[in-house]
Image: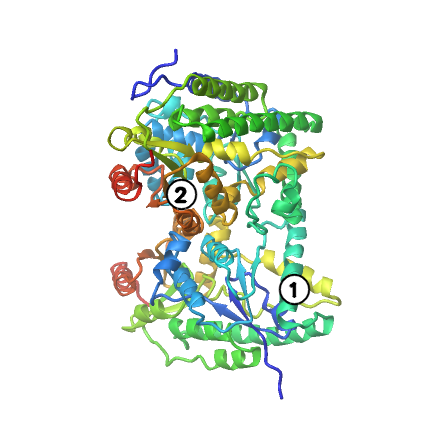
């Protein structure tokens, strides 16, 4: 009889999947959703919080996700609140906060190591497994293969014409973040959409997308295709990151390097860094326009808009704030704005 | 001159003195800054003591924001923020000073804040680092950001232990991180201004700050036990907060002691803010600076007095830290100060303790967008039979606080029975 693989939920984009895989766990990224029920009590507990996270708390309180443990990353106030609420309300499931610092100073690196060691201890408690150089190497192989598949998907999205629409790409990336690595590779490689010809190529920035609903609305009439993005459930998802090292300490050290090398989610990054990332990815994807899609109460991306607008001088840049339940109207507004800018492929 | 409050009660001399001192201090600082002396803008939860030890005068971002609000310059400041393409409906309390830099001197409060040489903040929430990034782009201003770690652990019942057992309360790793960053910050600032950090002087500053906190604790204990309320909360706030921003100076210790002695005298004299006191209210959250009269506006109709704000209470319970190494002890002061106010169960257990000690019959809970898990605080109070009104608004944005008085009146009428 094959032993059951422990399942560890992950909220946020800071958890090094390689570490979880090395403990024999299957990481399952949890994002909430664009639409769906929000339990009033969950909303009340969280306060003014991004609705996607309120929906996630609703799901967790209803036991919608069978998990052996949950890791919450302190990469946004919404996620941190989720952790605080779960802790304060006595979640039955083991819950752990991963609190990675943001600037690579010596004290911050020491704290990052403390955080990864605590994460490893949590995973050991959940899985009953031990970490070794061999298990880390095997996990690196699996995750590296996933990274290759992510890059193949990225290339298909950026082809002329694109070979995968944005909605299908987000679907595939989110699925992959919930599957065992080998299945995830197959899922990503299967993400192929009939060629979209003549559509405006759009780079998406702003809030992360908990599911593909908004992209699907935006791409519905075929005039727009999202060829790239810089939010953390799209191209910036920390998926497929693998590091190597002789010892466990070496691997943890390399994971800390990888953490600090990223330009992380807007809530933790400087606006200037986010703007450069938006510009560079949009240019690499040969985007005709950039669209900032920002959910209400996800305020960090609002502060990036001015810098992004400056950095993208010469490229049409539009933004929209999406109220809960307003996805359809906002997508239509965005389509109209893109058309008014006479953005053509 | 002590002046008189709106209801005829004489204003607390400590409050009047603190307010007068602060304006004079600010104008003097502004003159020196315009003549070239480097000053700093520091967030409320930044380690101010290191600036004091280095002889760098500092203005606290949130205090300056409260002045901008009180002088009715908030809307113009937010408009200036919007003109830069930045949101005017996000973290208004933290961003008002940035916007106010764009106001002409004749309409800026007290002539405006001279450009700071340094801007210092912890990476609190999703946006503080971005606001201070903007400060760092102003000519002549250099921004420094410190890490803001999450509240793990977060024990309930921290208030009797935190002054000495801070490593257990906040966790050693968090303190070590901030300690390291404070040392790096101090080294850089010292280099910039051509001075060195004198650790003995820093230890003296820490000792004075602890002395100040002990006076505040005694004052809070007096007020908790006093019936009826002897001093208006609107007097207590400036009398505590102005010295708080001068923490670590002999003047601040003397001001805290003066407040204590004046409160004690009022209690001995049987003074009542409102003789017909029938309901005691607690105000959780930041002060409503643009409408301080609001705090007194429920007395005549309901006999309702606000007996509590966080400013004295956190000054009493949250600041004292004793330790051998002044930098490490300073890190322990700030590493989780905000958590004590906002993160359950640290926050919720403390608010319940304070509500019971002060005999609060009802609570008005102003919930800003950046208040984490406010529902847990509200639930903890309600479970103890204390009704809570949650108001979701930014205290610094007059647009967001329209109708607050009516909401409170309805709440008091419907949910807070007269207890006496």
Q: Residues within 10 Å of mark 2 (few under 14, many from 20)?
A: many
Q: Nearer the viewer, mark 2 or mark 1?
A: 1
Locate the N terminus of chain B by quadrant.
top left
Chain of residue at mark 2: B
Left or right: B250, with A289 as reference point:
right
Residue, disc 1:
A120
Compare residues B166 and B64 and report the one nearer the observer: B166
Asked if residue B147 can be seen in this view, the reply is yes
Looking at the image, which residue is at 62% across and 50% down?
A: A104
Compare residues A329 and B377 and report the one nearer the observer: B377
Compare residues B124 and B115 and report the one nearer the observer: B124
Left or right: B260, with A165 as reference point:
right
Farthest residue toward the right? A246
* Above/below status of B366 relative to A184: above
The alpha-carbon separation of the residues under discs 2 and 1 comes to: 36 Å
Asked which secondary structure carries label 1, the reply is helix
Residue A287: % across, % down = 40, 64
Asked if residue B39 can be seen in this view, the reply is no
Residue, disc 2:
B91
Left or right: A290, with A100 as reference point:
left
Chain of residue at mark 1: A
Residue B172: % across, % down = 66, 47
Q: Are marks 2 and 1 on the same chain?
A: no
Farthest residue toward the front? B420
Locate the C terminus of chain B by quadrant.
top left
Asked which secondary structure carries label 2, the reply is loop
Residue A247: % across, % down = 75, 66
Residue B296: % across, % down = 31, 28
């Amino acid at each position: 009889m094959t032993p059951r693989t422990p399942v560890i939920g992950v909220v946020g984009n800071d958890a090094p999947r390689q570490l979880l895989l090395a403990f024999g766990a299957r990481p399952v990224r949890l994002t909430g959703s664009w639409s769906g029920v929000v339990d009033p009590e969950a909303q009340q507990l969280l306060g003014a919080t991004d609705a996607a996270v309120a929906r996630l708390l609703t799901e967790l309180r209803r036991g919608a996700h069978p998990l052996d443990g949950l890791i919450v990353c302190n990469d946004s106030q919404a996620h941190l609140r989720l952790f605080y609420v779960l802790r304060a309300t006595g979640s039955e499931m083991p819950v752990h906060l991963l609190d990675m610092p943001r600037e690579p100073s010596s004290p911050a690196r020491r704290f990052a190591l403390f955080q990864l060691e605590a994460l490893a201890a949590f995973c050991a408690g959940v899985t009953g497994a031990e970490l070794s150089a061999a298990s880390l190497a095997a996990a690196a192989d699996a995750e590296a293969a996933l990274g290759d598949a992510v890059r193949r998907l990225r290339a298909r999205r950026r082809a002329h014409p694109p070979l995968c629409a944005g909605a299908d790409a987000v679907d595939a990336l989110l699925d992959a973040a919930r599957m065992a690595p080998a299945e995830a590779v197959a899922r990503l490689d299967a993400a192929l959409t009939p060629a979209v010809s003549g559509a405006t190529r759009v780079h998406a920035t702003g809030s992360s997308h908990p599911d593909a609903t908004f992209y699907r609305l935006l791409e519905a009439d075929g005039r727009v295709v999202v060829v790239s993005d810089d939010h953390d459930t799209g191209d910036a998802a920390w998926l497929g990151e693998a590091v190597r090292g002789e010892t466990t300490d070496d691997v943890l050290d390399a994971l800390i390097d990888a953490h600090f090398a990223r330009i992380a989610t807007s809530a933790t990054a400087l606006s200037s860094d986010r703007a450069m990332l938006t510009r560079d990815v949009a240019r690499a994807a040969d985007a005709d326009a950039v669209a900032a899609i920002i959910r209400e109460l996800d305020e960090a991306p609002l502060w990036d808009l001015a810098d992004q607008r400056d950095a993208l001088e010469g490229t049409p840049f539009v933004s929209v704030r999406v109220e809960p339940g307003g996805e359809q109207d906002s997508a239509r507004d965005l389509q109209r704005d893109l058309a008014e800018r006479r953005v053509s492929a | 001159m002590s002046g008189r409050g709106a209801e005829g009660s004489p204003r607390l001399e400590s409050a009047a003195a603190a307010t007068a001192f602060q304006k004079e201090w600010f104008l003097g600082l502004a003159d020196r800054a315009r003549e070239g002396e480097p000053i700093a803008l520091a967030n409320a939860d930044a380690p101010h003591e290191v600036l004091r030890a280095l002889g760098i005068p500092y203005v606290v971002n949130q205090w300056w924001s409260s002045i901008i609000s009180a002088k009715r310059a908030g809307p113009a400041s937010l408009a200036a923020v919007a003109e830069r393409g930045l949101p005017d409906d996000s973290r208004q309390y933290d961003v008002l000073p940035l916007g106010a830099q764009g106001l002409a001197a004749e309409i800026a409060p007290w002539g405006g804040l001279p450009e700071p040489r340094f801007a210092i903040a912890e990476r609190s929430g999703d946006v503080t680092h971005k606001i201070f990034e903007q400060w760092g782009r102003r000519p002549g201003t250099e921004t420094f950001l410190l890490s803001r770690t999450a509240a793990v652990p977060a024990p309930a019942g921290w208030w009797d232990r935190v002054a000495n057992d801070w490593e257990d309360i906040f966790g050693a790793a968090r303190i070590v991180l901030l300690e390291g960053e404070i040392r790096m910050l101090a080294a850089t600032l010292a280099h910039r201004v051509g001075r060195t950090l004198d650790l003995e002087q820093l230890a003296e500053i820490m000792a004075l700050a602890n002395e100040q906190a002990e006076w505040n604790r005694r004052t809070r204990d007096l007020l908790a036990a006093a019936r009826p309320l002897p001093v208006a909360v609107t007097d207590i706030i400036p009398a505590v907060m102005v010295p708080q921003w001068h923490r670590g100076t002999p003047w601040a210790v003397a001001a805290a002691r003066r407040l204590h002695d004046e409160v004690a005298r009022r209690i001995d004299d049987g003074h009542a803010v409102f003789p017909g006191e029938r309901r005691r209210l607690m105000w959780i959250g930041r002060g409503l600076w643009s409408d301080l009269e609001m705090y007194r506006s429920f007395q005549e109709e309901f006999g309702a007095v606000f007996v509590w704000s966080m400013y004295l209470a956190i000054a009493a319970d949250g600041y004292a830290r004793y330790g051998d190494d002044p930098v490490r002890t300073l890190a322990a002061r700030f590493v989780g100060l905000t958590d004590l106010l906002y993160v359950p169960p640290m926050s919720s257990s403390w608010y319940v303790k304070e509500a019971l000690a002060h005999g609060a019959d009802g609570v008005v809970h102003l919930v800003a967008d950046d208040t984490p898990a406010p529902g847990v605080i509200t639930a903890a109070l309600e479970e103890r039979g204390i009704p809570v009104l949650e108001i979701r608004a930014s205290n610094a944005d007059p647009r967001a606080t329209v109708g607050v008085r009516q909401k409170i009146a309805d709440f008091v009428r419907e949910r807070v029975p007269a207890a006496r």
